[in-house]
Amino acid sequence: MMGEHLSVSTSRLEGFEGLHQAVKGSHVDVMQLERGRLRGTLSHVGIGDFSLSIGAFNVGVRTQRISTEEKLIVGMLLSAKDRVTHWAFDMQPADVLVIPPSVEHDGVFHSGSSYAAIRLDLADLPSVFGGEPRLADPEAWLEKRHYRADDGVGMAGAQRLQQIVPHLARQPGALSEASAEFWKRAIVDCMTAPVAASLPRDDSGYLPSAMKLVRNIEEYLEAAGSRPVHVSEICSAFGVSRRSLHRAFHEVFGIGPVTFLRHKRLCAIHSILRQSRPKQTTVSEVALEQGFIELGRFAQYYRAMFGEYPSQTLSGTS
């Protein structure tokens, strides 16, 4: 299968003008508020027509954006030295902001800050959030909203976003179609976790028996072969929420679906490495293709699972 083109660019900011393209594909008017020379970095990740932007700067700025494009922007504040407001919302690190299509945006960063933002087509929401009808409905995203991050979920997503950019930068040229889909879902998942966590419990819907649901999912994973499958893909494919999926996997396996999928990806990597030769591939290439970005942690997971390091499997020296 043809893959999707991957582009990763990082530029140094030497003045507030560099923030005009703070969100890829969108123009922002910027005014500097705090004294001093603005310095920072601006990174854009493109996977096909999907984009992630991450920026960091050291002095306060005011940003304004008027757009006529039919794109939804979801932004996350990654860090802030001082107060940050968007519209009338006071932001804290890992909080999420929803900017609907064609809506004017007004933000004030009182001092140095960093942020992340993605642009989405409303038509793509049903496939992205198929397991959660309340998020899959485009109407739910047509009002500007602020979501306060849960301490654990939000910060974990914020940290992971900042790790994804440098690791994808090491992947030359293109991702396989399967890997591209996984990484797009992983990025969206990090960005929207506080939104999903804000939803009240909804246990009124029909849930198949845990065993039946898990067996159906295992058949789905078997048909997927060795490609990485993100948990949000499963939710979309089976029309179940994360909470329902978590409940079913714990009942059957005693572990959550994320852990189960990680173990499955580790097994796929083990098989690939056993069938490969050191001159044909590298551990980092295989790990990234299967959705692992922190190679140190990946090696720990791998050794705990198989009793050897991935390099030993590849070289046949275990």
Image (cartoon, rainbow, N blue to C red):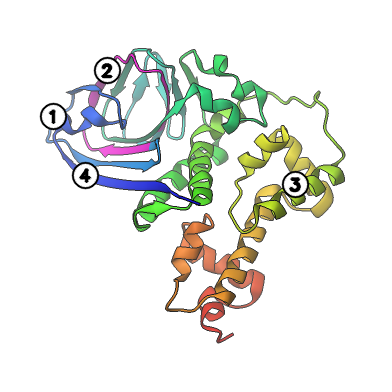
Looking at the rendered image, the disc whose residue lies closer to the viewer, 2 or 1, is 2
Estimate the x, y position of residue 192 in percent, counting from the top left. 52, 32
Point out the residue furthest to the front here.
1
The quadrant in which residue 25 appears is top left
Q: CA distance from mark 4 to mark 2?
A: 21 Å
The answer to whether 101 appears left or right of 193 in the picture is left
Left or right, residue 134 beside residue 119 = right
Sequence-wise first label, 4 or 1: 4
Q: Which residue is mark 2?
A: 64
The kind of secondary structure element at disc 3 is helix
Residue that carries the numbered disc 1 in the rendered image: 35
Residue 256, placed above or below residue 153? below
Real-space Cα separation, disc 4 to disc 1, in angstroms = 22 Å
Identity of the amino acid at label 1? Arg
Label 3 sits on residue: 217
- Residue 268: x and y in percent read 62, 64
298 in magenta: no
**Image: magenta residue range:** 52-76
User: Residue 156 in the image: x percent, y percent?
Assistant: 51, 44
Classify mark 4: helix, strand or loop: strand
Q: Nearer the viewer, residue 59 or 158?
A: 158
Question: Would residue 203 be found to the left or right of residue 194 on screen?
Answer: right
Asked whether the residues under the numbered discs 3 and 1 touch, taking CB atoms below 8 Å apart as contact, a structural biologist would say no
